[in-house]
Image (cartoon, rainbow, N blue to C red):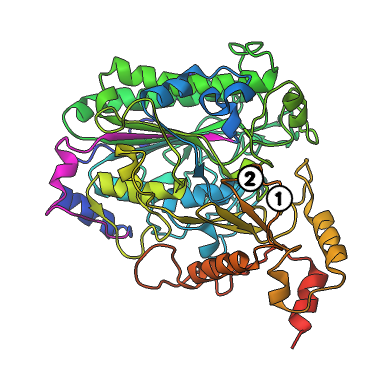
Amino acid sequence: MLDSLNRPGSAERAPQPIDRAPLWGLMALCSIGFPIVLADHALGADQVTGNAPNIILILADDLGYGDIKSFGGDRCQIETPHFDRLAREGMRFTDAHVNASVCVPSRMAIMTGRYPWRFGPPEPGGPWGYLGTRLPAGQHTLGTMLRAAGYHTGYVGKWHLGTKMQTLDGRTQGPDNVDYRRPLDVGPPQFGFQESCILPGSLDMFPYAFVRNNRWVGEVTAEKGWSAFNRRGPAAEDFEDVKVLETLSGEAERFLRDRAADAQQGRPFFLYLALTSPHTPVSPSSKFAGRSKLGIYGDFVMETDACVGRVLSALDALDLADNTLVMASSDHGPASYAGRRRKATFLQMKELEEDGHFAGGPFRGYKFSVYEGGLRVPLAVRWPPVVPAGTTCGRLVGLQDLMATFAELTGTKLDDAAGPDSISFLPLLKDPTAAAPRTSMAFEASPARAIRAGAWKLALCPGSGCAGTYGNMPPRDQAWRDALKQFGRLPTRMEELQQGPFVQLFNLDEDPGETTNLAATHPGKVQELVSLLRSQISAGRSTPGPTLTNDRPRIPLFPGLPRHVAAAVQRSP
């Protein structure tokens, strides 16, 4: 498949590196609608003369905390030498989180430094990879910020932030009306990425076709589907699920080769490599089939790890390792329906646990849930001149903090409205024992909310906070039935909802597995955390600064509240 991704011709060629002075680069960005990002230095000259590192962000898809040997330890039965190398040569973060336990909102926060529930409704779109754009036009992103700071920006892999596709009939995009001969109107280039090669959605979400610099690759005239859910839909003729990781790794290597000479001359690059694995379909290539004793899931994790290794090897070969910051993590926890069988199967992850492999590490829950297994992710960072090798940091960090962290290390001053939920953890990269920059963080399941402050975590729901269709326990409906039975009646006031058994309070220092709900015995702590979340919602930000306006007029504390419960509360005087 790599050969089929022909380099674009003159009409499709990726934008050339910015060779103009940084001021002119800023003016150009502002002229097309990107928000202004000012450098601390007069013209941002330090950003383009060799002081700032190259940056590579590798984001796996559905990779659990315990899927990586250096994080899962004895409870991990998969060999992950390359991710482990990154941790050994850099720093492990053991309390790193994403804000959401499902793909789209997690990726929105990573890209923008803003909690996704602050954004307004998305643009109209179709199913799966045809979803409409999730970010408004002109949204400040990692791409726009780093491009303005003098970086050459590239995005490779799963996008899943929505696009605007041209259609044959002028109607909302969907499987039956997209014109694959014409470029996307909105894609990565509109959010600051000068080069891109993406899948619009996940590997099990049609259309199954690559898009390079907003142009479709190949003839999208076939219909295909993959084993997990057998979602059949439009596909490029030569697209094969088992070859996608090879393609993405090759694209990353090409980007690094193309940027090496400029990088060595002090013109840095930013590469966002968003892998499609080990998200379903669990589709290891023939090269990795049979590698793991855990079957195809282990094989696929090993191939995911090998992608990290290829990036590290390319940096070594190009003599770029010493001045490149490399981060590897995941968009959220593992899927309960993934495992040895290709078909998505209810709670088959438990079969791997019976064989000693715990994809979620010591934590409870999976993807979609409000528990740590869905929200805590492995994070390893290497930057040889700055990050001490072989170290571990136990401070709370969120992947939405990348916006502020990258801004600080490039000397970029963020506008007051940019990255309102992002806090730089650059001090921790220098010293893992430094004071924690972040002391609280908000989370969402599908769809419940949670808030963390210090060791205390409050889940504003009973049970897993999600439907439990594929194995998260207890499922939302059952958890609400049990909570109402325990309470003895329908709650009639919001204050009644803000107590056990309708909420869950955990002390993660003492109970990382979230086994004991302390809400009934610590009502003051519950109210403290509710007040904290309310204040972060109303302020439009969770960081210091002027009050901002959320794009949505109403952000409920209890999304997913059963209708009869919501009606009872609303009827109360």
Residues at marks 2 and 1 touching, judged by CB atoms closer than 8 Å: yes
Residue lying at 78% horizontally and 35% vertically, measured from the top left? 347
The C terminus lies in which quarter of the figure? Answer: bottom right
Q: How many marks?
A: 2
Would you say residue 484 is visible in this rendering? yes
Judging by the rendered image, the residue that carries numbered circle 1 is 516
Determine whether 43 is above or below 151 in the image: below
- Left/right placement of residue 430 relative to residue 436 reads left
Name the amino acid, label 1: Thr
Dividing the picture into quarters, in which one does residue 343 lie? top right
x then y, percent, for residue 54 = 28, 34
Q: Is residue 167 above or below residue 121?
A: above
Q: Secondary structure at mark 1?
A: loop
Q: Residue at x 65, y 47 (%)?
A: 371
Between discs 2 and 1, the one toward the N terminus: 2
* Residue nearest the observer in this picture, 217 or 162: 162
Query: Magenta residues?
Result: 35-61
Q: Is residue 49 on the magenta stretch?
A: yes
How far apart are the alpha carbons under marks 2 and 1? Answer: 7 Å
Q: Which residue is more in the foreground, 345 or 544?
A: 544
Label 2 Cα crowd, 10 Å radius (few <14 / some 14-19 / many 20+): some
* 499 within the magenta span: no
Q: Identity of the amino acid at label 2?
A: Asp
- Dot 2 corresponds to which residue? 511
Image coords of residue 552 (percent x, y): 54, 70
